[in-house]
DNA sequence: GCAACATATTTACAGCTTGAATGATTCGAA
DNA sequence: TTCGAATCATTCAAGCTGTAAATATGTTGC
């Protein structure tokens, strides 16, 4: 049983809307929790992704945004004393981003805040795993 | 076999990243196609969602954004002669958004453009249906 | 060595989005 | 009826994001 192209197109549009809707909800969740720490959503996202030293470009990829954007965000975090730009050990073009002690501490608190009452709590671990697989397949295809 | 809370938290963070990544890719796709019609991504999203007359708030909900944003976007579409704000038949507070003939035609072209080479084409219809179910469950829970 | 091209980051700019405040209208309860 | 709360749309300020261009450094092939 196949679906007509029009029906398929409608289904895909709906699906795009759902993906976007969930992304919005996740962003809102991050915004709420970040605000309690004096951070904006993008600052919190950056902090969340900084699990270790990395370059600006790496951070941009993890945040799914343009590198020029990370310049803006890291500027803010640096002014707050949470992150430092060190010279990269091997590539003088690149910057090595490292968390300060304060940044590391705040990141830990942020991760705790984000973990409780997650926007994905409506799915059990098995369902989340299925979702993970489908999203990865959709993203890596092509 | 259960997972530890920390592992579960890490998995959820990854999953959030994937949802966001796919949403970004969809946005980029819309941006590309919209540009060929002289529209921005948000204008195209608004047009895409206007399958019939609706209020500003309804449009905001469909676009997963704030009502104040739709004011901005509809202003643009109205200036381009694609949409008109009519008085709402029963509620004088609300506006009734209707597409002009030109808007209807452009919307049809937009939908055609969006349908080809969709960001979700890596998933077959069955997989898309599973994804649909999971996303809906995640969104409607709570 | 060096010219040509690629990569990392930054800057400038324009457009998008949110959140709070405002005015108009509707609805419900005393 | 009339008051007060809720809802619809808009405005404005502030911040976020992407594009394109500029700068600096690295890499490749001759």
Image (spheres, coloured by chain):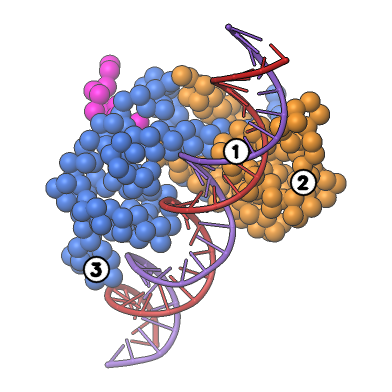
Chain colours: A blue, B orange, C purple, D red
Q: Nearer the viewer, mark 2 or mark 3?
A: 2
Q: Earlier in the sequence, mark 2 or mark 1?
A: 1
Q: Nearer the viewer, mark 3 or mark 1?
A: 1
The residue at 42%/49% (across/down) is: A64
What secondary structure is found at the residue carrying circle 3?
Answer: loop
Percent of width and height locating residue A25: 47, 33
Q: Is residue B121 visible?
A: no
- Front residue of this view, candidates B127 and D8: D8
Q: Which residue is mark 3?
A: A91
Report the span colored magenta.
Answer: B1-12
Q: Chain of mark 2?
A: B
Q: Which residue is mark 2?
A: B83
The residue at 49%/37% (across/down) is: A24
Q: Is B34 within the magenta?
A: no
Dot 3: within a 10 Å radius of its alpha carbon, few (fewer than 14), some, or many (20 or more) residues?
few
Percent of width and height locating residue A131: 45, 29
Corner quadrant of residue A7: top right
The residue at 27%/22% (across/down) is: B3
């Amino acid at each position: 049983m196949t679906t007509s192209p029009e029906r398929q197109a409608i289904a895909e549009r709906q699906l795009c809307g759902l993906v976007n809707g969930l992304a919005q909800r996740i962003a809102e969740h991050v915004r709420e929790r970040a605000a309690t720490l004096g951070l904006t959503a993008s600052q919190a996202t950056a902090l969340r992704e900084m699990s270790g030293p990395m370059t600006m470009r790496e951070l941009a990829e993890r945040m799914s945004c343009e590198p020029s954007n990370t310049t803006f965000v890291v500027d803010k975090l640096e002014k707050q004393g949470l992150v430092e730009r060190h010279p990269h050990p091997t590539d003088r073009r690149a910057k090595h981003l490292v968390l300060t002690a304060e940044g590391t501490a705040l990141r830990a608190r942020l991760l705790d805040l984000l973990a409780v009452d997650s926007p994905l709590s409506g799915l059990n671990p098995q369902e989340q795993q299925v979702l993970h697989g489908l999203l990865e397949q959709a993203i890596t295809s092509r």
